[in-house]
Amino acid sequence: MNNFEAFEKNSMLSRIKTELRHHAPFTAAGAASGIILMIFFSGMSSETALGIFNVFHPAHVFLSAMVTSALYQLYKCGRLKGKCALAGLLAVGYIGSVGIATISDSLIPYLGELMLGLPHPHAHIGFIEEWHIINPVAFAGIALAYFAPYTKFPHAGHVLLSTW
């Protein structure tokens, strides 16, 4: 490994540490408030829980699409002094939001349902079952990031919401 490769490796590790340090307060606040909300709403009906999921999941997808696309736009294409190619931005924004949100909001909870032996486990794949909601909010987040690639508020909201 030459000196430049070593510098890049240390630079990347430094960047990861910095990002984790910035995420920690939002993750901690999200986890703490999530635990409090679980205690407060422990007797909630499954219909009410589904209604809340049907609000939070699209919000999670929207914020994730906006942040993923904005970060791609700023870091990948910003260096090129222009806008990203739309196809690349759509791919990164859609897969980075819908793909990850499906894993975190649907598949991991489904595995938890199976492991706990809960009655009527269901994966609820939003971009297929509720395609008319999830896909438009993902594309709206991508479009907003294309024209206004802001990250601070949507990123904070995404990290907070994704811990719930």
Image: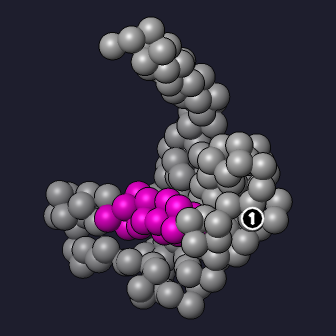
Q: Is residue 40 visible?
A: no
- Assign the magenta stretch its main secondary structure: helix
83 sits left or right of 98 in the view: right
Q: Is residue 111 magenta?
A: no
Q: Is residue 80 visible?
A: yes
152 sits left or right of 45 in the view: right
159 sits left or right of 99 in the view: right
In depth, the one of 14 and 108 nearer the eye is 14
- Number of callouts: 1
Quick one: label 1, few (<14), some, or many (20+) residues within 10 Å?
A: many
Residue 36 found in image quarter: top right
Residue 126, percent from left and from top: 45, 79
Which residue lies most toward the bottom here?
A: 132
Q: Which residues are magenta?
A: 90-107
Which residue lies most toward the top here?
A: 3
158 sits left or right of 106 in the view: right
Q: Residue at x 82, y 60 (%)?
A: 148
- The three-letter amino acid code for the residue at tag 1 is Tyr
Which quadrant: the N terminus? top left
Q: What kind of colouring is applied to the model shown?
A: one colour
Residue 3 found in image quarter: top left
Q: Residue at x 56, y 90 (%)?
A: 132
On screen, residue 154 above or below 10: below
Residue under numbered circle 1: 146
Q: Residue at x 67, y 51 (%)?
A: 77
In depth, the one of 8 and 160 nearer the eye is 8
On screen, residue 110 above or below 125: above
Residue 139, percent from left and from top: 64, 76
Q: Secondary structure at mark 1?
A: helix
Residue 14, percent from left and from top: 54, 18
